[in-house]
Amino acid sequence: MSLLQAIELSKQYNDVYALRNLNLSINKGEIYCLLGQNGAGKTTTINLMLGFVKPSAGKILFNNIDLVENPSLINKHFAYIPEVVHLYGSLTGIENLEFFSKIAGNHYAKNELVNFLNEAGLQESAHHKLMTSYSKGMRQKVAIAIAIAKRADCIFMDEPTSGLDPKATNDFITICKKLAKNGTTIFMATHDIFNAVNVANTIGIMREGILVNSIDSKSITATALEKLYLETI
Amino acid sequence: MKIIYLNILKRIIRQKHLQLMSIIIVILYILVGINSAISYKNKIALFDQAKANVRKAWLNQPAQNPHSSAHYGHYVFQPVTALNFLDNGVTDYLGSVLKLEGHRQNDAAFSPIMNNSEMARLGEINFSWVLQVLIPLFIILMSFNSISAEFEQNNIKLLKSQGASIGQLLWGNVCSILTILLTLFLVGVFFIFILYALLTKQPLNTFPFSDFLIWISTYMVYFFILILFSVIISALVKVSKLSFLILLSFWVFSIIILPKLIYSTSRIIYPYPSKQEFTKTLNESRKKGIDGHDPMDQRAKQFNDSLLLKYNVKSLDELPINADGLIMQADEDYANKVYDKHFSDIRTVTNNQNQLASIISIINPFLAIKNISMTIAQSDYNSNMIFLSEAEQYRRYLIKELNTKMAYGGSKTGEWDWSVDVSYWNTVRDFSYPQAPLLKRLSYRKIEIISLFLWVVILIVSIKLIARNYKIV
């Protein structure tokens, strides 16, 4: 059974469609990567799934429950990692994690918070440093720790590898795979074709608000995907 | 909301520029507190000494004609209230010393501004100035990016996805900024009060604690309004630079431009007559009355004739009383009517000008707090008007007392060298008047109070509406 489904999902701003009749289905523990140019509708899809905007038409189902009618499920089961993670520079990594976890209703002991940060791959020496001293990759890891600490069923990531160096990207991909292996579903909007092939189970390609291709990553190489992507957009 | 509130509080406290600004404010409190305390102490000492000297000079007058005393003049002083220490309002501009004498009404004289250089135009720094002008800047610095930064740093979606509502975010910011501000404010108030108690050595049992508490509460409301306003602007604009620019423009407009604009406009809408025109009209009206010092004056003659008829005698020498005293009082009574009419016209113009400023305070909380603060501290225009009115009542009492003594004290008409016993001077009471209770004083500030109330209500409703309809994308 699908964990997450979009059925004829559309979002219209005045006369312009940002997303048109999206249909997709994602299973538990699956990593779904959505490719497309800027303005193709990737972020709109994430915004709709997370309830930041309301759909003009269609449905979003989580475990067959309509999320538009039950928005409280979104906060409970979904987590979000933005493209650029800033969090709060005047707080340390562990303080940021503690704060965002508390907002989600989770009050963890210090050692639990440390474990989450470790799980996200943030070295322990950085836990108590102010976020202003963090690199982009380190901030990304705190955001992952926040998602882990939330024990979210589904994590939405908006271009998470954008601006990361190869090592940080590799770390990130490893963590994503680990999370998926543990049953977390990941929905990722990205421009990174090679990592999409590397990490995803399913890859979607969007153009002008329409999902034009949906590919099993096992059936395609990075080069072939790049070719298909360039032909599609 | 508690989690968000505590988090914002922690973040604000850690900001270096705000730490620096807080230190500057505390230093300002110290400087202003010491300056106000010394200035207040000197003013009290000077006024007490001057009052004592004036009374002593009055009591030590030699045996002389009471009318000579009427021309000698008598100084009265507007009481310096304890809260003048916090807000000296317009006292320095309007003056708080008045010379009382027969036949004429005087404006307040010897305002401290008269004895100062042109730097005095910049005004004296006091605690209320820091609260009204500088603290709003501090509020802007703390809150201009309160919500906009959440957008710029991509935190808003993260917060929302974690379950935080926009309402929690808005109120969390309002409450945390308010907490820091009130802490700084109350520390300042406590510090200023300690300085007042230690440096001025005024007895605390006469300190108007209830007025003081109302004064503190009014400023709390003022800060609350400014914080709500700043957070709302930050939320609506969503761009920190623009939010800062809008709030700074609001500060400049409200605190610098609008008050000056109202002052200029009110003088155009409600102009004063020129000094020359006023004096001419006053003198013309005055000439229509009795000249108490000119026996050949036609109206004085008529008054004398009426006295002869009343006492059934043929000449003024035969009167059992001194007609000079009565005729001078009649002159005084007429002059009072003339002055009442003409000065009342002038005061109506001033009241209209002030009323305009009150009405504008509906859109400008700075004007509202400024007026309310001065009123509570009794350093506003109305308090000065009460002093002038009481001083004029006292002048009339004094002159009437002296003229009556001259008329019925045992002298005969024309005996200008007749004198009263020195013990007489003590029977004339000294100048004093009861202070108007706070509620009565505040009744002059209904518009300003309504203004603050409306600002609070409108801003709270706005926050609720924003929280309900806010779009984060």
Image: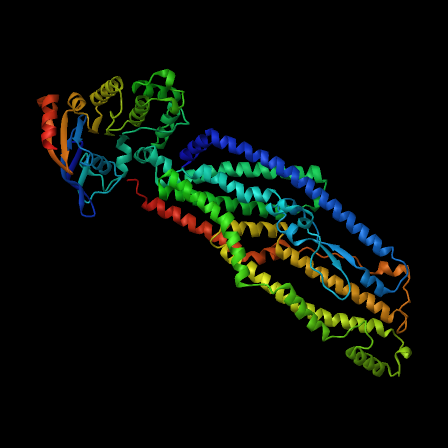
Above or below A182: residue B145: below
Above or below A193: residue A69: below
Question: Horizontal and vertical percent for residue B18?
Answer: 48, 32
Closer to the camera in the image, A189 or B291:
B291
B406 vs B372, left or right, is right
Above or below A9: residue B103: below
B34 vs B259, left or right, is right
Question: Horizontal and vertical percent for residue A101?
Answer: 35, 28
A132 vs A176, left or right, is right
Name the residue at the front extreme: B276
Closer to the camera in the image, A86 or B105:
B105
Q: Quadrant of the N terminus of chain B?
A: top left
Query: Can residue A225 be seen here?
Result: yes
Question: Horizontal and vertical percent for residue B283?
Answer: 70, 70
A11 vs B128, left or right, is left
Q: Quadrant of the C terminus of chain B?
A: top left
Residue at coordinates 74% horizontally, 65% vertically from top-left? B104
Query: Can residue B378 be seen here?
Result: no
Above or below B152: residue A135: above
Question: Horizontal and vertical percent for residue B44?
Answer: 73, 46
